[in-house]
Amino acid sequence: MTLGDLWRVSNEYGEDAIRPLPWYPGNLAWHLNFSRKELRKNLALESFHEFLKHESDVGNITRQEAVSMVPPLFLNVQPDHHILDLCAAPGSKTFQLLEMIHQSKESGLLPGGLVMANDINVQRCDLLIHNTKRMCTANLIVTNHEAQNFPNCSLAKDYSEVYKDTCKLQRLEFDRVLCDVPCSGDGTIRKGHDMWRKWNSGMGNQLHLLQVNIAMRGIALLKVGGRMVYSTCSMNPVENEAVVAELLRRSGNSVELLDVSCELPELVRRPGLSTWKVKDGGSWFQTHDDVPHDRKTVVLPSMFPSSDITEESHAGCGDFEMKTDNRSSFSRNCNVEETRKNNHDMDGVSIGSTKNLDCTSNIMNSKFPLHRCMRIVPHDQNSGAFFIAVLHKLAPLNGSQIQGTKIQHTLGKDRIEQLHKEPQPEARPYETILTRQHNNVLEVDDDAELLGRRHNLNMDNGTSKDKNSTEVEMVFNDVESGREESGDRMKKLQKQSRWKGVDPVLFFKDEVVIKSIRSFFGIKESFSLEGHLVTRSTDNARRMYYISKSVKEIVELNEQVGEQLKIASLGVKMFERHRSKDGCSCAYRLSYEGLSLLLPYISKRILYASPVDFHRLLQYRTINFAHFVDSRFGEEAASLMPGCCVVVLVEGHKNADSILKDPMTIAIVCWRGKGTMNVMVSPPDRKDLLERMAYRFGIKASTEEDEKFYPKVNGFDQGS
């Protein structure tokens, strides 16, 4: 698939088939006007579909529903921000946040910030790790906790102690928090048709307090001056405006609801509601006083427009102005202060609906400026539905406010615990990438007794083994293994970690091994390895992961507080132990995932290949030294001592230092064997590099005759 193919698809299917989203900054997001069925079944779109899947696999693009990309944009992320994504799986928004902190990163330099992505379910954490792994970042931590009970990790006894030692992290706090909470998911009905059959109003009622507790935990973890975005893919005010009102009530003057009407001006949004009714069973209630006594513990005061001081207004039926064109009332640039009156024009369960409305009853309005919330509805800009509120923390929460975040719904607690224990269904491939996942959808069965989480899993971790080359097997038998530990080893690791079944995060402190790696690859002292390498093994570390300074500080804090954070994954894989018997003096090889970060600092074990020979290496994966087109390159490869090396694509007569520091430089990890040069790059990455070279240099693909001449060695496909 080439750029020409993209234009051809656009021409054949109309100019709206592929178009940029006008509200997304920098034209970085594009809309595809094809259904899932069209992409899969239409033969004319087959190559385009394959292109999308491949580019997603290698991390060049992320496929998700357009409206689900909106919440992170209102966080106003900067490269040095510490960001918490409380309900992160399957990871599309997390990937988006990582892109934001890496936007201004220079080659070989890491941003000062980080993203901590959390999810309650272990399997969903695996999916989160799988989807964010494509970013190859040292600035990510994946954790596995209940969002409403996310750990404090505090060394300070009180808030004032945080500032006593400015050089030492005292308390886990974040500049930005994203709370894309579990919700009933009625905003997804355009794509999830089963939602029509399963949805009922009781779902939102049962989730309300959980949503409040998660969001309050997010506020507690937010730094003073920080920003939090609360969002759902629901239109139910009990899950939206009622939650925001309760957050403001509990937080007092510590938090304010921001007016962000001037941000993303091209995004069509409607104001939040200031009044609504609550449904329980077959009854609608205007106030909590109207709720029968035996239902007051289920239908809570916080679900209503005002659970504290109320502003009453008397209205008759004639006071409601019904508009036929809602878009004229909710324009892109409407004055927010004028939108209060528009709340009566909203469809659905708002007071604007005159059906079953007692015209003489008092209308309860929230005292909070809920019109500053945003409602994105499908028919305004052909999208899914979303609710978004942006909160700004003005002052620390007091003790009673923090304690209030621990409140649980007495009747829903057992159901929520049962939800956590339920097995997660597997989904068909590609669905996890094509559209927004139901990662935040909680369902209730017909009896409204059990909660079930809907989501798609793509757990295809299948790998191929080398059956043709004994040399490859010697080098990569440890690469293909490692998915499972022996029973004795797992028991040993579990004893050394607070969290059952989770390997501990250990700093790699073997100075002899680190010096050996630095000497073998000529890694400059300006690139700090000491204190930045971690492993999940307690002995004979097989893999070492590189973490940024910001991640390192949190790992150190977590050690000091007794491993309160349950860390599922962190950092980028940089070194792997090999078992080659070629006489390599260094026990570790480079990982392709961490090469882009390390490349500007390597001064040894580097070979510079012409486009033709670089292409051949990628295409055939293993080549005899004598078979390179450039005999000089073959001689240099043959003269190199056995072991891991880096092959850099070079064109023209560029200086070596400028090539290595250029972020556009293409390089791969190889193994210099006894008589061959072998590529250690995964199949998706190899394919991506081949396509880039074809576009850049116009090098043709191999012929069948070439395939016979250069044997394929499948084991190298899984090299990193």
Image (cartoon, grey):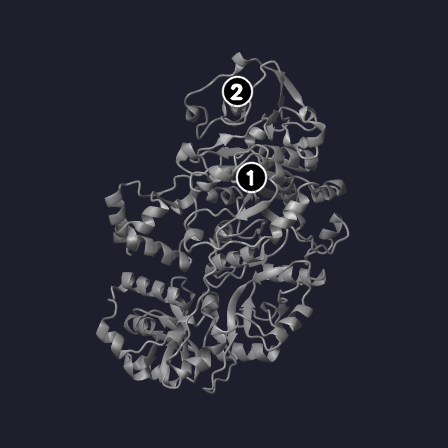
Residue 300 position within the rendered picture, expressed as x and y whole percent measured from the top left: 67, 33
Task: Please name the residue that numbered disc 2 is placed on.
Answer: 355
Determine which quarter of the picture holds residue 208.
Answer: top right
Residue 376 position within the rendered picture, expressed as x and y whole percent measured from the top left: 47, 35
Residue 298 position within the rendered picture, expressed as x and y whole percent measured from the top left: 67, 35
Q: Residue at x 63, y 49 (%)?
A: 418
Q: Quadrant of the N terminus?
A: bottom left
- Which amino acid, by three-letter code, is at mark 1? Asp
Determine which quarter of the picture holds residue 14.
Answer: top left
656, above or below 38, in the image: below
Can residue 46 be seen here? yes
- Which amino acid, by three-letter code, is at mark 2? Lys
Whether residue 716 sits left or right of residue 275 in the image: it is left
Identify which residue, 593 or 54, lies in the foreground: 54
Please tell me which of labels 2 and 1 falls first in the chain: 2
Crowdedness near tag 1: few (<14), some (14–19) or many (≥20) residues, C-alpha within 10 Å? few
